[in-house]
Image (cartoon, coloured by chain):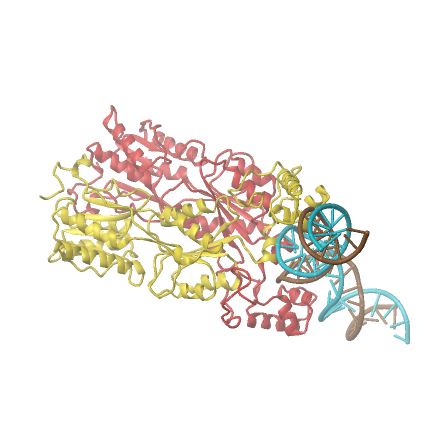
Chain colours: A yellow, B red, C brown, D cyan
Amino acid sequence: MKDIQAEGPGAPDAAPETGKPQAQRKIAGAGDQRPTLKTIAFMTGLGITTVSKALKDAPDIGEATKQRVKLVAKQVGYRPNRAGVRLRTGRTNVISLILDTEEEIIGLTSQMIQGISETLAGTPYHLVLTPYTRRQDPMDPVRYVVETGSADGVILSTTRADDPRVRYLDEHGMPFATHGRTQMGITHAFHDYDNEAFAGDAVSLLAGLGRKRLALIAPPAGLTYTRHMQDGFLNGLNDHSLHAVPLTSVSLQNSIQEIAEAIRKLMSGPNPPDGIVAGSAGAGIGACFGAEQAGLCLGRELDIVSKQSSFDLLTWFRPGLNVITENFREAGKDLAAKVLALIEGTPAKDLQTVVYSGRAIARTQSDHLPQPAQPSQIP
Amino acid sequence: MKDIQAEGPGAPDAAPETGKPQAQRKIAGAGDQRPTLKTIAFMTGLGITTVSKALKDAPDIGEATKQRVKLVAKQVGYRPNRAGVRLRTGRTNVISLILDTEEEIIGLTSQMIQGISETLAGTPYHLVLTPYTRRQDPMDPVRYVVETGSADGVILSTTRADDPRVRYLDEHGMPFATHGRTQMGITHAFHDYDNEAFAGDAVSLLAGLGRKRLALIAPPAGLTYTRHMQDGFLNGLNDHSLHAVPLTSVSLQNSIQEIAEAIRKLMSGPNPPDGIVAGSAGAGIGACFGAEQAGLCLGRELDIVSKQSSFDLLTWFRPGLNVITENFREAGKDLAAKVLALIEGTPAKDLQTVVYSGRAIARTQSDHLPQPAQPSQIP
DNA sequence: CCAAATAACTGTAACGTTTTAGTATTTAGG
DNA sequence: CCTAAATACTAAAACGTTACAGTTATTTGG
């Protein structure tokens, strides 16, 4: 148990005020005189080294002394100076979250951050955001972190089956965990949602509703989970002897409007699907709009199964829109925990998780008062 | 112009590889041998001091020397060591974003982060997230940042009219900018959306649609913009001689479900409103659901005007749902710029902005194919 | 009783940077 | 020609921390 050492915004209570509220400071941002090891050394009459060791329970310090030092440290509200530690040890106490700011699976960013913060609270770790845009090379932020040593660990999102960032981080020995798997023969920590199961369940659900011709709004090509979701979808179709309606013009990356338009076209064209599996909340919404613009009624002419983030937006969105939830908050929580474990030496092979939230339940029209009373199940 | 000094993930291109890809490192996260001032000093045959000064264009270094030093620095990919700088100067090159993780005005977090990152790219600043939950004292993260001097500047969200965090930061001389104004006689940097104008416009729009009895889904009590929005709403009602329908059971803080339920009740009760102003996208969605559950049709029995974040979700959501956009990305961009300006010495009074996106346009039913062709304007 | 081992503590150096107070060398002023 | 000032450069110290190599006392064991 790091006791006093545990620093960070979520750490044990703040010290009683350091002193008087000093009006001016020499350097921006620094509270005037915060206690250092020297302060404690002076107060206890011990050497700086002794204090340092006592605080981290070194074996060659007397028990009584440790107690004394810790007491004083707590009293004066000692918090180790991050810059000092970092300079000396190279340890940054920083986890870097690298994210594609343009990607916005609705609640993803905030939920993920929330989860990560939850894990990091009470540890000395800070969360630093290292975003990049699509115009940049995705390698940029990764290289930056490694080259400048600006973090002890990294969390990656939007993972690709063959992801150069993963190779780079692995080669450079930087601890990292990815949201999503890879397929490149590198053993690394990851947290993934079982998109295959999701798609499979979605198909089963639609099959149960009597649907025969299904379309999938899939993630953009290249991401690992694109394959997973497609596999699950196709296997599901096979299992239930249903037909696929190809839809390649849009992916989850497209805007709601674009998806809506694509779905409208699809539904208005020849041989439209009677069931749609949407890989994200945005796609689900877009699909609804598109179907409506084509003059169709969800739950009657077609049903949709959509994924949504833990931010519960879709559940009550439309009848005929069935929802399976992926919990990004949990993902963030777990990813952070994995990175911390890596840093502490846990082997990556023990830090691989695939989760699945469980099956969705087909929702009936009765959940939606304003709709015509007509069961969505076609027996 | 900080040239070479400009560090950060968005900085000029990375150095050509430091050396061979070393497999093991002494300390996690550090690339093996990255160049320091000492390296450059050795290479140029100059003293460390000279190099340091040359890189920051000190006046007492010869022009030729500066050129030489900068060239070498660029060649070896020199990046100042953050810990060194921070230890020596107290400067962290960090901006801390303090946010209530439970608050989730749909795109807020990610949009804001995107904006902030945009400003910070190309500067040496990193963005550190310091979240807190409702169970904590909102002062905790603020105190933490000040006491540990862990940032050069702070961005606050969910600002209150009388906000102890603002007082604290001001008293301790920590540069900060708030998203939203305060009313406590402290001059500080802020970026605010003109919620009074928003509500006023929303009312005008509903008045133009012939609506007479309006309800407002307002922010939770205590936040500054709650007052603004209410004022705008009430003034608008006055101007158009409309009536207010009180709605106090829910605020923007409530979940979509809770809002939907409250609106359903409201619409089913005596004297229901025929127009609703929703202060956030979530509230707008909830209001739609609630109205539908009460068996009403948007655009016919009632109209709704909702705010939404720049993440364009509502525009095509329902007919009768009119949208006014608040751009959180711009807010983040501006807030970050303001904090940087503060750090560089710009007085806070010059860093106060209220923006307004402009009026919404009443949307007609014809935008929505599946709806009965019936104009939403009641002449 | 002395050597060796143990326990408890400490000084020095170093991490990379900037600031302070310099030292040479050249130029200008009288 | 000598002093004063300007120019170009630099060594040393310090920021707070930890690793390393000690240094005392005290205890053990032969």
* Nearest to the observer: residue B169 or residue B201: B169
Placement of the C terminus of chain B among the 4 image quadrants: top left
Identify the residue shown where x is 41% and y is 47%: A333
Identify the residue shown where x is 56% and y is 35%: B185
Residue A36: horizontal and vertical position, in percent?
66, 47
Question: Does the rendering let one see residue B67?
Answer: yes
Residue A215: horizontal and vertical position, in percent?
18, 55
Placement of the N terminus of chain B among the 4 image quadrants: bottom right
* Mark count: 0
* Nearest to the observer: residue A299 or residue B283: A299
* Nearest to the observer: residue B32 or residue B6: B32
Identify the residue shown where x is 59% and y is 72%: B72
Please give left or right for residue A63 compared with residue B372 in the image.
right
Residue pushed farthest left? A379
Q: Quadrant of residue B59?
A: bottom right
Residue C18: horizontal and vertical position, in percent?
66, 58
Residue B142: horizontal and vertical position, in percent?
54, 41
* Nearest to the observer: residue A281 or residue B353: A281
Q: Quadrant of residue B170?
A: top right
Question: Does the rendering let one see residue A48?
Answer: no
Residue pushed farthest top? B270
Does residue B379 lie above or below A98 as drawn?
A: above
